[in-house]
Amino acid sequence: MELFLVRHAPAEPRAEEGGTQADDALRTLTPRGRRRMRRAALGLVLTVPSPQLIATSPLVRAVETAEILGTAYDRLIPEAVNELRPGAGPDAVITWLKRLPAEHKVIAVGHEPDLSILAAVLVIGRQSPIIELKKGGACLLVIPPGISPGTARLDWLMQPRHLRSLVTP
C-alpha cells in the first residue's frame, strides 16, 4: 500500500487564540489556506497519480482540505473516516488500513501530531515522531502487505512550499 499522509491546510485560529469558532471541530480553512492548498494539491497530483481513496478526518478543516484534493483529482469524493479524528490513535488507523486492499494508493488527510505519530509507528514501531508535517504538507509511506508497526518505508516528505513549487507559476 502507498499511504500519503496530508496535514490539513491552514485554518482559522482557535477561540483562545482570537478565532471566532468556539468548537474546534468546526474551524474552517482561511482564504489564504484554501488558495495555497489548491496550488499544493496540483503539485500532489503530479507526484501521486490516480489514488483510489481520499480519506479524511471528519473535522471541517480536514474535510475542506480533502475536498480541494478531490477537485484536483478529477472530482474524487473524499470519505470521512473517524479513525483519522485527532486523538484516535495509530492503532485505530492501522486497523482501518488493514480493511483496505493492499494495492491501494490512499491519501489520508488529518492532523498533527497524530499523522507524525502514525508515521513513526509504521516506520520505526514507536510513538516518537520522526517527521514534522507543516499545514498542507505531505509524505509517502510505502507499507508492505500485513500493515504492521515498524515495517513501512518513508519514501518522501514535502512541505507545502515544495508541493507548490512543483507547479509552474
Image (cartoon, grey):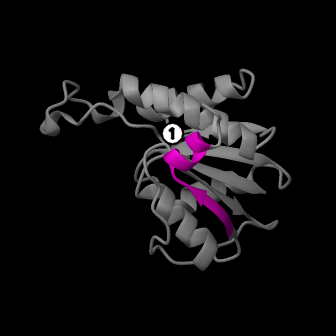
In the rendered image, the quadrant that contains the N terminus is: bottom right
Please report the residue visible at 24 percent of the width from the left and 35 percent of the height from the top: 13
Query: Taking the image as drawn, is residue 19 in sight?
Result: yes
Foreground of the two, 81 or 152: 152
In this view, the residue farthest toward the right is: 103
Please report the residue visible at 64 percent of the width from the left and 77 percent of the height from the top: 150
Q: Residues within 10 Å of mark 1 (few under 14, many from 20)?
A: many
Foreground of the two, 72 or 105: 72
- Amino acid tagged 1: Ser
Q: Is residue 163 magenta?
A: yes
In the rendered image, the quadrant that contains the C terminus is: top right
Along the horizontal axis of the image, is 158 left or right of 4?
left
Along the horizontal axis of the image, is 116 left or right of 81?
left
Please report the residue visible at 47 percent of the width from the left and 55 percent of the height from the top: 133
Q: Which residue is mark 1?
A: 57
**Residue 73 image position (x, y, % from top left):** 72, 28
Q: Is residue 43 magenta?
A: no
**Residue 128 image position (x, y, % from top left):** 44, 75
- In this rendering, the answer to whether 63 lies above or below 84 is above
- In this rendering, the answer to whether 105 lies above or below 43 is below
Task: Label 1, secondary structure: give it.
Answer: loop
Q: Quadrant of residue 157?
A: bottom right
Instruction: Specify start and end residues of the magenta stretch as a single range.
Output: 154-165
Badge count: 1
**Residue 22 image position (x, y, % from top left):** 20, 29
Please report the residue visible at 86 percent of the width from the left and 53 percent of the height from the top: 103
- In this rendering, the answer to whether 72 lies above or below 160 is above
- In this rendering, the answer to whether 92 lies above or below 30 is below
Along the horizontal axis of the image, is 119 left or right of 47?
left
Query: Taking the image as drawn, is residue 60 in sight?
Result: no
Foreground of the two, 54 or 38: 38
